[in-house]
Image (cartoon, rainbow, N blue to C red):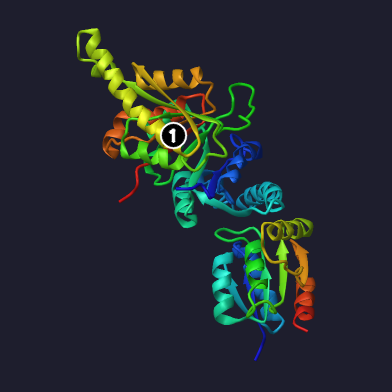
Amino acid sequence: MEIKKLLFVTKFEELCFDALRSLLGLRQSALDHVVFLTVIERDKVAMHRGAGYRKEEEIRLRERANIRFIDWAENLFVEGMEVGVYIEVGTLVSNVIDAAKDENADLIVIGRSHKGVLETLYSGSDVTELLRRAATPVLVYKHLTESSLVPEKPFERVVLATDWSPASLRAVELLKPLKNVIQEIHVVHVVGDEELTGSNAMEIQKTRKDRRQRLDEVCEIFEAEGITAEPHVYIGDPEEEIEKAARESQATMIVMGSSGKSAFVERWLGSTPQRIAEKSMYPTLLVPPEQA
Amino acid sequence: MSKRVLVVDDDPDVRLFNTTVLEENGYTPLEATNGEEGLEIIRKELPDLVILDVMMPKQSGIRLYRELKTDKALKDIPVIILSGIAEKTFLRSQNALTEFGGEQVPPPQTYIEKPVEPDELASVVKKALG
């Protein structure tokens, strides 16, 4: 499982060329093709009473996007990379899913959602919707808080949070070939409070030891590939503890398998990976399970 | 029989413009929406000329051009590049691909930065087809 082709989704506000540039370290692994996608929201050009479909506005927005993409593409072409472009009108998530499928992309990169609180509450954010539906790994890119700077090497120090689900194991497969890009991986498992059923310290220590051994096995997989890996067991609320683990290890990115919950349960209760992808200050890469 | 010219561009407005100019000047236009489709049509139809955009989905004009010019059966088909990408960038990208172990390719017959006027397009097509 290699990252050869990347689909870079932008509205030119939350993600710009600096973010893409920071990901070009993946070229040291296998990346050789970047596809740009921007979606002009239908509302901006839709039929208005007395005005009809605003074709001129569509052309203006398309050309504005095209000019930015030409500039970005020129930077990549001269380095011998392959570049593709989609400028679409419609809904973001459907267009991203379609382009990822058509292009057979290995990774989707998207910025954090900018919907309002109420809008998000009722319809879910675009990012959550994408994470729910995508069959391709999704990197939710974040800028370093307030400074608006991008992390220079987002894959340098990775926290891989695992629960040994099929999606978590697929995340291991995705990271394995990135020896030239990743400096160290901190493999983290969070034991929920509810799992600590024993009333004595021995039982709790036993649980810790068991999880630690399983983490060691994951670390050995990375070590065999030449990537430094360290296991860490945390206890408590997964959302809080994974964020804590990222902070403690000075992570540049959190990587997780996406939830194994059913689509119905996820829609109503959400999932830990999706919440982390939305709320964490760290860039978060979610890897879905292999589709049947 | 009129000469057949393949227009490879993902923008439907550009395809319409180019094919209209070609028809008005007595050529038979063929169309493709990306590099991948373009290469398929070139192999199947062996057009007399290709008008090629650079930045497209699936496969860019840069890769299509390289594949065309390194294929013995296709390399003599003349190509006009019509793109928003600067000629200097196109040539530098071809050099970069050559450095990565590829075969050296000749520069395109003609390179025009978008937009193009109908008369200019008709004129370069006529020149390219001899």
Q: Nearer the viewer, residue A222 or A116?
A: A222
On screen, residue A256 versus residue A198, left or right, reads: right
Give the quadrant of residue A127.
top left
Residue lying at 72% horizontally and 65% vertically, measured from the top left: B82
- Relative to B85, residue A242 above or below: above
Residue lying at 44% horizontally and 34% vertically, measured from the top left: A125
How far across and how far down the image is residue A271, in percent?
Answer: 34, 30
* Residue A47 appears in the picture as rendered: no
Give the quadrant of residue B19.
bottom right
How far across and how far down the image is residue A61, in percent?
Answer: 63, 48
How far across and how far down the image is residue A273, in percent?
Answer: 39, 30
How far across and how far down the image is residue B70, in percent?
Answer: 66, 72
On screen, residue A80 versus residue A87, left or right, reads: right
Residue bearing the label numbered 1: A125
The type of residue carrying mark 1 is Ser
- Relative to A159, residue A29 above or below: below
* Residue A76 appears in the picture as rendered: yes
Q: Nearer the viewer, residue A81 or A84?
A: A81
Q: Nearer the viewer, residue A229 or B115?
A: A229
* Mark 1, other Cα within 10 Å: few <14 / some 14–19 / many ≥20: many
On screen, residue A99 versus residue A15, left or right, reads: left
Number of marks in the rendered image = 1
Mark 1 falls within which chain? A
